[in-house]
Image (spheres, rainbow, N blue to C red):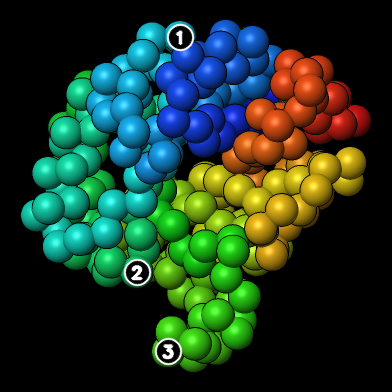
Amino acid sequence: MKPSNRIFVALDTTDLDHALALGRDLAGLVGGVKVGKEVFTALGPDGVRAVTELGMPVFLDLKFHDIPATVAGAVRAALALNPYMLNVHASGGAAMMQAAAAASGEAADKPLVLAVTVLTSLSDDDLASVGVGGDTASQVLRLAQLAQLSGLDGVVCSAREAEALRAALGPDFKLVVPGIRPDWAASDDQKRITTPSQAVALGADYLVIGRPITGADNPAAAAKRIADELSR
C-alpha cells in the first residue's frame, strides 16, 4: 500500500465549507477522510454526501451500538452514502455485529465493517470504573476476536494493541488506528497514542489522524510530512 493511502484525516468540524476545503487541499495526499458524529449530527447525510462527492474514500465513524435489528437498519441506511468503511461497537455483542456484517453485504460495493474495541481515551482505571475486569489489552483482544468470529472486516484499536492483534488475528484482518500523534504534535486528550511510523510497524493498516493535520497552519504540508515519515 502506498504510504499516504494509509492516512485517513478526521474532519471533526460542524462547518461544511471548512470540511470541504480541507478535503480539497488534502486530495491526493492522503488515503481518505473520516466523517464522525460531529459532522453527521450538525450536517446530516447531506453533509456526508458533500464530502463523498470530493471523490475521496470516506470512513463513516458513527459507532453504531444498539439491538441487532436497529444496527442492521442503520448500516443499510449508511450504504446509501457509499462509505469505504463504517463501524459499530464490539461491546454490542456477536448478534449485533453479525447483523451489521449481513446488512453491509447487501451493497454492490461492500464497505469494510469495523468494530470499535476500547476507545483510545480510556485507561485501565477507566475500564475498572465501568465494571470491566482485566486490563485494556485483554479487553481489546477479547472484543477483536469476537468481531472476527462475527464476520467483521477488522477493528478500530490503539496501536499499542496492534502487534498482539495482528499476531492473533492474521494478516487480512484490518486494523484501523486512531490516537496517532507525530513526535512534533501535541497529544491532546488521547491517552494511548503512538507515532505514525510506529503504528504501521506494529501492524496498523490505516491511521486516523486529526488535529496534527487539520489543526496545522498548513494541513497539506503536515500530511506530506507524515507520509514522508511513513515512507522512511
Q: Earlier in the sequence, mark 1 or mark 2?
A: 1
Instruction: Bin the neighbour count of mark 3 within 10 Å (Cα to Cα): few under 14, some 14-19, many 20 and up.
Output: few
Question: Considering depth in this image, is 99 or 34 the residue closer to the camera?
Answer: 34
Rendered-image quadrant of the N terminus: top right
52 vs 105: above or below = above
* Distance between mark 2 and mark 3 Cα atoms: 13 Å
52 vs 37: above or below = above
Question: As shown in the figure, which amino acid type bears the numbered disc 2?
Answer: Ser
**Residue 123 placed where, x, y %?**
62, 75
Instruction: Bin the neighbour count of mark 2 within 10 Å (Cα to Cα): few under 14, some 14-19, many 20 and up.
Output: some
Q: Mark on residue 131?
A: 3
Mark 1, secondary structure of its residue: loop
User: Can residue 1 be seen here?
Assistant: no
Q: Mark on residue 54?
A: 1
User: Can residue 166 be seen here?
Assistant: yes
Mark 3, secondary structure of its residue: loop
Mark 2, secondary structure of its residue: helix
**Residue 15 placed where, x, y %?**
46, 24
Q: Quadrant of residue 49?
A: top left
Q: Quadrant of residue 191?
A: bottom right
Question: As shown in the figure, which amino acid type bears the numbered disc 1?
Answer: Leu
**Residue 116 placed where, x, y %?**
44, 57
Residue at position x 80%, y 48% in the image: 186
Question: Considering depth in this image, is 21 or 223 the residue closer to the camera?
Answer: 21
Residue at position x 70%, y 32% in the image: 215
Tag 2 near tag 3, CB within 8 Å = no
Judge left or right: residue 227 versus residue 37: right
Q: Mark on residue 91?
A: 2
Marks 2, 3: nearer the viewer:
3
